[in-house]
Image (cartoon, rainbow, N blue to C red):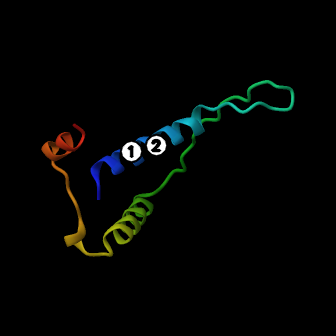
């Protein structure tokens, strides 16, 4: 996959997420509504393990040979 496309997509995603949390929609009176704090649920270790296994299954098809690791040198070269 083209690294410029991936970087562009990641930047776009970061901007979108930033917009979601920073944008302050106005209520009926024209006043900005307060920004709501993101509250994450308390998860057990079993919950985290389940989430990790679903991500692993979705991204690799359950095959460890499909894992990708970018060492520090590769990451910095891709971002240049």
Identify the residue at horizontal 60%, vertical 35% (top origin): 37
Q: Looking at the image, which is closer to me, 58 or 7? A: 7
**Towards the viewer: 61 or 43:** 61
Is the N terminus in the top left, top right, bottom left or bottom right quadrant? bottom left
Residue beneath the point at 51% across and 51% down? 42
Q: Residue furthest right?
A: 29
Q: Which mark is residue 12?
A: 2
- Residue in view at x 41 percent, y 64 percent: 46
| Circle 2 residues within 10 Å: few <14, some 14–19, many ≥20 | few
Q: How many marks?
A: 2
Which numbered circle lies on residue 75? none
Quadrant that contains the C terminus: top left
Quadrant of residue 65 within the rendered picture: bottom left
The picture places residue 5, in percent across and down from the top left corner, at 35, 50
Q: Residue furthest bottom?
A: 62
The residue that label 1 is drawn on is 8
Residue 13, how many percent across, how many down?
A: 47, 45
Give how far across and how far down residue 74 sits, in percent.
16, 47
Marks 2 & 1, CB-CB < 8 Å contact: yes
Instruction: Give the secondary structure at mark 2.
Output: helix
Q: Relative to the observer, which residue lies in front, 1 or 69?
A: 1
> As displayed, is residue 11 above or below residue 31?
below
């Amino acid at each position: 996959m083209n690294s410029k496309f991936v970087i562009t997509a990641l930047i776009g995603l970061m901007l979108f997420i930033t917009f979601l949390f920073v944008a302050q929609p106005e209520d009926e009176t024209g006043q900005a509504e307060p920004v709501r704090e993101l509250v994450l649920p308390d998860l057990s270790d079993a919950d985290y393990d389940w989430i990790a296994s679903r991500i692993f299954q979705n991204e690799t098809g359950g095959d460890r040979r499909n894992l990708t690791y970018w060492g520090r040198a590769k990451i910095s070269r891709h971002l240049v």
